[in-house]
């Protein structure tokens, strides 16, 4: 696709302000954290010298399932490690917008962790940010296409003034 608009990548669309949990966090505390911060899910990280290494992802759905089972079966003291999804689908900071859109349409996720090559969590990109960026990118492509489609042929204009009647 030829146009002058730069193609958005995950690094430009992600948020760096993250609510994270550790695998040792009790499930009740994790649930409270999700609710208080009004987030549907959170990355589970292992802290290593000021770096956050992604090891899983926990959602409201995971908490709902495990907490209900914990209460129903009187099996208290579950941790985030027991309920989290291991090996979540991740993207790199350089993942382009079309790959992001494809991942969101192929996987039932609302957010994707953005990780560096060393598995350090650097941000999260969500579906609405990708959709918004796709709309903006499409508008730029259409505007670029319209600008080139209606551009006058300068050679004809220059030659026109030299035609003698």
Image (tube, helix red, strand yellow):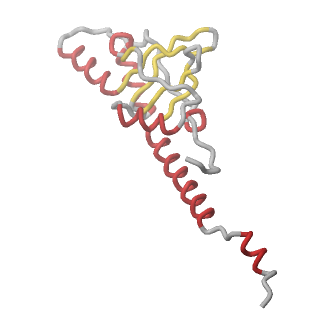
51 or 96: nearer the eye?
96
Q: Is residue 158 above or below residue 80?
A: below
Number of disc labels:
0
Most distant residue in the bottom direction: 165
Residue 92 as seen in the image, left or right of residue 111: right
Residue shown at 59% from the left, 9% from the top: 48
Most distant residue in the left direction: 72
Q: Is residue 47 above or below residue 133?
A: above
Q: Is residue 75 above or below residue 117?
A: above
Residue shown at 43% from the left, 16% from the top: 56
Question: Residue 102, image x and y in percent?
Answer: 42, 36
Residue shown at 72% from the left, 73% from the top: 156
133 or 48: nearer the eye?
133
Question: Residue 147, image x and y in percent?
Answer: 62, 64
144 or 115: nearer the eye?
144
Q: Is residue 91 above or below residue 26?
A: below
Question: Residue 127, image x and y in percent?
Answer: 44, 39
């Amino acid at each position: 696709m030829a146009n002058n608009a730069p193609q958005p990548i995950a690094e430009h669309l992600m948020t760096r302000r993250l609510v994270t949990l550790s695998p040792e966090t009790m499930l009740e505390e994790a649930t409270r954290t999700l609710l208080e911060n009004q987030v549907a899910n959170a990355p589970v990280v292992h802290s290593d010298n000021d770096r956050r290494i992604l090891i899983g992802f926990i959602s409201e759905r995971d908490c709902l399932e495990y907490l209900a089972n914990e209460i129903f079966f009187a099996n208290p003291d579950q941790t985030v490690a027991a309920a989290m999804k291991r090996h979540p689908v991740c993207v790199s900071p350089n993942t382009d917008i079309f790959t992001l859109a494809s991942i969101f349409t192929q996987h039932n996720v609302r957010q994707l962790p953005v990780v560096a090559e060393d598995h350090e969590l650097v941000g999260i990109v969500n579906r609405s940010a990708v959709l918004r960026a796709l709309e903006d990118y499409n508008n730029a492509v259409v505007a670029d296409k319209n600008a080139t489609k209606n551009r006058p042929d300068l050679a004809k204009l220059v030659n026109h003034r030299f035609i003698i009647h």
